[in-house]
Image: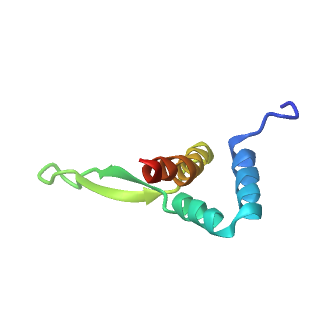
Amino acid sequence: MSVHEYSPEKALKILLEKVKERGKLLAARIQASIDAGKDTTLTQEAADRRQKPRTYRKTVPYTHEEALGVAVDVLQACFIDLTLCINS
């Protein structure tokens, strides 16, 4: 990697550090959004042929790339979408 190329994990860490320097409340909101994870649907096979397969939801953590996207979405919601809403 060159000096300016970051892995998603490193980019997320740097982004959270920079935001935390500016405002702890916003950094906490981003971290809470990332910690919430995402819902996935899992299917468990039936024990015998008479039963239906069981489908259930489970919350799983985001990958580093997805977490970076969530962080950017939270920043966009705070600085762009909210401003547009107020100005309209």
Q: Position of residue 79 (x, y in %)?
A: 57, 51
Query: Is residue 2 left or right of 13 when viewed as pictured?
Result: right
Say above or below: 78 vs 8: below
Q: Residue at x 62, y 47 (%)?
A: 64
Q: Residue furthest left?
A: 50
Query: Is residue 48 left or right of 14 when viewed as pictured?
Result: left
Q: Position of residue 28 (x, y in %)?
A: 61, 67
The one nearer the camera, 68 or 42, is 68
Say above or below: 85 vs 21: above
Q: Residue at x 54, y 53 (%)?
A: 74
The one nearer the camera, 57 or 11, is 11
Q: Residue at x 11, y 52 (%)?
A: 50
Q: Position of residue 23 (x, y in %)?
A: 69, 65
Q: Residue furthest right?
A: 3
Q: Quadrant of the N terminus?
A: top right
Q: Position of residue 86 (x, y in %)?
A: 45, 54
